Image: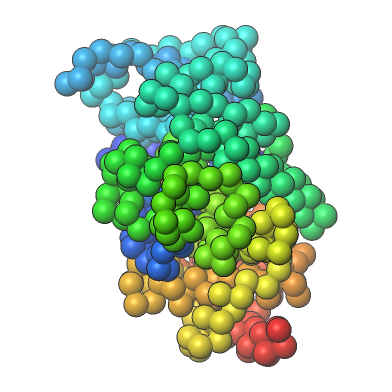
Amino acid sequence: MNAFGVEESRSTRPLEILRSVILRRVAKGRSMLHQSQPRYQSRTALAMYVTLFVLGSQSVAVEIFDLSGPDGARTVEGRVVVEGEDGGVLLEQADERFELIPAELIQSRQTRSDSEDEESLHDHDHDIISQRLLAELPQGFEVLQTKHYIVCFDTTRGYAQWCASLFERLHDAFQNYWKQAGLELVKSTRPHIVVIFSTKSRYVEESADELGPAAENVVGYYNLMSNRVVTFDLTGMDLLNPRGGGSRNGLEILRSPAAAGLVATLVHEATHQMAFNCGMHQRLAPIPLWVSEGLAMYFETPDLESARGWRGVGQINRPRLDHWRTHHRAGAIEKMMISDELFRIPRDALDLYAESWALTYFLLKTRKPAFVEYMRILGQKPSLSEDSSQQRREDFHAAFGVDASELEIMLERFMTKVR
């Protein structure tokens, strides 16, 4: 059961059909990586939505799978998120990663006892998790543990501490914002994992399998399947450090105007991770892209005048506002509401991001209770389900009580007053 009381269910569809749903959503996320703004803007990798719907559920047993395939035999354990009628499964492992396991690889499976479940999949000891991460990552990595995060890094500790401090402030602000709005979220006892590479070249090399050529053009991303934020030490970028000299203390980011987009990127990706781990959405559910991206942009606003580099929640996002004013087109809300396809078209993607921010900003400033209700509706979407355009339209109308064309008129009037 997720944060909104939704019971997990198993699909009767074959694994190959489920795999096609995942790949389709993966393709959406990857396509967005190519629509980045020059130099700094990132896009969430692999699908950009949504959360682990098994969080807070104690009813789904931990299972052990003995596998045998071309790469040899191995044993994995975790909770079955979805099971196809052919016996293949989507498994959530103890490290929060998702893995698709074809039926033909499964030699045997068994269920662990309740006491073993608690010790295996819900082992939240930061030290144990840190040891697992260090064993997995390339040599030279260290870990920094905070209240809600484990930051893995092979750059300076000062930069890792700066990032961790930024993320912790975001975590508290995110939880407090939605609590005050009337949306109770799950407070995950699992740490959020962030991986920071020392250089862009190492980051690109290690991210190539996930991002492909797009790794060269983005400075950070949230990986839907691994549930991690991955980035690199931005202080070594030529953009901020044109004379070279290697990594500097993270706070020095704030001395450059170019830092605004970099800080926004970090907050943007960490916001995705927060939303995907608090019960707000369900991982691999059909959440409209305008919602997931609009929320991330609502939280991402940087503030170079603050020593913290981030001013908080719901400030005017100037780059998005300026873009909206010069590129807004009538009918955009309807198109975003019923389909994500336009986000995949290069010439439209940045325009739709601006539209997503504007719509989210407008709704949260003027219709917050209705937006919270919309989040509750979306939070009930089962993992790997699919919504028709008509269903998306009905969900929107159920929450806001108006259709897209009516709301767009209100939005346009509201945005003329935003300064």
In the image, 161: left or right of 233? Answer: right
Depicted 190 relative to depicted 414: above or below: above
- Please name whichever residue, 227 or 371, is drawn nearer the observer in this view of the structure: 227
Residue 172 visible from this viewpoint: yes
Identity of the residue drawn at 62% across and 9% down: 115
Residue 23 visible from this viewpoint: no
- Please name whichever residue, 78 or 348, is drawn nearer the observer in this view of the structure: 348
Identity of the residue drawn at 52% across and 65% down: 258
- Please name whichever residue, 269 or 2, is drawn nearer the observer in this view of the structure: 269
Identity of the residue drawn at 56% across and 16% down: 128
Quadrant in the picture for the C terminus: bottom right
Where residue 215 sits in the image (x, y, percent)?
33, 51
Identity of the residue drawn at 51% across and 31% down: 152
Where residue 186 sits in the image (x, y, percent)?
70, 39
Where residue 191 sits in the image (x, y, percent)?
61, 31
- Dividing the picture into quarters, in which one does residue 242 lie? bottom left
In the image, 51: left or right of 308? Answer: left
Q: Residue furthest left?
A: 70
Number of numbered discs: 0
In the image, 411: left or right of 65? Answer: right
Q: Residue furthest right?
A: 180
Quadrant in the picture for the N terminus: top right
- Please name whichever residue, 189 or 66, is drawn nearer the observer in this view of the structure: 189
Where residue 189 sits in the image (x, y, percent)?
67, 29
Depicted 214 relative to depicted 317: above or below: above
Its colouring scheme is rainbow
